[in-house]
Image (spheres, helix red, strand yellow):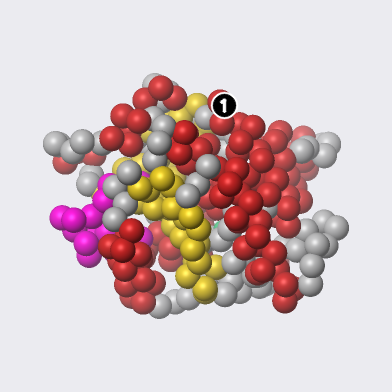
């Protein structure tokens, strides 16, 4: 059975839901990745690993490295170009044409025929405009396919007690909360593959800790999913994703949607 994961940038898959995707591959799902951009506008590493013009190529390689670490099956790119981060860390979407992006997702979903589709949450994790438009198009694509749509999950779902509440999509209540510690080493390998982003991964936590932390030290061992389609109160759906993930599922009371 196939799963399609759609993210805006190489690294989103690992940072937000890498452990979950490792566990799904471990229990036998073929996990396919679709990435909107090659993260051309992001950081170039510390020390700098390439010039700006080469960053997309480098990050594509990093994504292929992460794919192997995550036990994934394939990765494709939609070939949007990620805009450079602006002054004062201003972030931008890679397109404003949500209809075109939706159509591309519909085509990819229909061509691959996944049983589940996983993407960004409704508030773009921390409000990143590229994550927001990715979520919007994912949501529209599923609505468009309607009855023939795969199960649709969003990551970084909200629940009380998450160690990094800043990165949760507050309106998306968690339906699956996972202890991914058995996937920590693999998730660390995938995160280390994204070498150009490693300084970024540890910056905020190191500052808070008052000492330089390593990439494995900053990765959290709890991840969560919200089932966006069909809605959970919809009754008779065979949610084989939640069944497959049962051995790692934590019983924590989900927070109320706000
Ligand atoms: Zn991103």
The verdict on residue 143 being magenta is yes
Position of 115 relative to 182 (above/below): below
**Rendering coords of residue 75 (x, y %):** 50, 58
Front position in the image: 1 or 203: 1
Q: Residue at x 83, y 62 (%)?
A: 48
Position of 210 relative to 93 (above/below): above
Position of 24 relative to 100 (above/below): above
Residue labelled with disc 1: 181
Q: Crowdedness of circle 1 by 10 Å Cα count: few (<14), some, many (20+)?
A: some
Label 1 sits on a secondary structure element that is helix
Ligand 1 is in which quadrant of the figure?
A: bottom right
Q: Is residue 89 left or right of residue 252?
A: right
**Rendering coords of residue 82 (x, y %):** 59, 71
**Rendering coords of residue 198 (x, y %):** 73, 50
Q: Is residue 204 left or right of residue 146?
A: right
**Rendering coords of residue 178 (x, y %):** 46, 30
The verdict on residue 231 being magenta is no
Q: Residue at x 61, y 49 (%)?
A: 66
User: How many numbered tags mark residues here?
Assistant: 1
Regarding residue 20, the answer to whether it shows in the image is no
Q: Is residue 112 left or right of residue 201?
A: left
Quadrant the N terminus occupies: top left
Type of secondary structure dominating the magenta stretch: helix
The stretch in magenta equals 138-154
Quadrant of residue 239 within the rendered picture: top left
Q: Residue at x 36, y 42 (%)?
A: 226
Regarding residue 112, the answer to whether it shows in the image is yes
Quadrant the C terminus occupies: top left
Q: Residue at x 61, y 74 (%)?
A: 83
């Amino acid at each position: 059975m196939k799963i399609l994961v759609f993210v805006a940038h190489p690294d989103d898959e690992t940072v937000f839901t890498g452990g979950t995707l490792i566990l799904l591959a471990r229990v036998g799902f073929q996990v396919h990745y679709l990435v909107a951009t090659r993260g051309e506008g992001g950081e170039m590493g510390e020390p700098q690993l390439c010039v700006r013009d080469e960053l997309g190529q480098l990050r594509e390689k990093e994504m292929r490295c992460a794919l192997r670490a995550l036990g994934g099956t394939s990765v494709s790119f939609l070939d949007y170009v990620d805009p450079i981060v602006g002054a004062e860390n201003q972030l931008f979407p890679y397109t404003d044409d949500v209809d075109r992006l939706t159509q591309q997702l519909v085509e990819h979903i229909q061509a691959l025929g996944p049983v589940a589709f996983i993407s960004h949450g409704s508030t773009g994790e921390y409000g990143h405009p590229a994550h927001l438009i990715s979520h919007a198009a994912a949501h529209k694509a599923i609505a468009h396919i309607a009855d023939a749509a795969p199960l649709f999950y969003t990551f970084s779902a909200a629940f009380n007690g998450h160690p990094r509440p800043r990165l949760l999509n507050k309106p998306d209540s968690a339906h699956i909360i996972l202890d991914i510690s058995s996937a920590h080493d693999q998730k660390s390998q995938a995160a280390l593959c994204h070498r150009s982003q490693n300084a970024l991964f540890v910056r905020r936590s190191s500052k808070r800790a008052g000492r330089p932390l390593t990439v494995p030290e900053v990765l959290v061992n709890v991840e969560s999913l919200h089932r966006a389609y069909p809605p959970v109160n919809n009754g008779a759906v065979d949610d084989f994703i939640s069944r497959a993930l049962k051995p790692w599922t934590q019983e924590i009371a989900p927070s109320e949607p706000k």
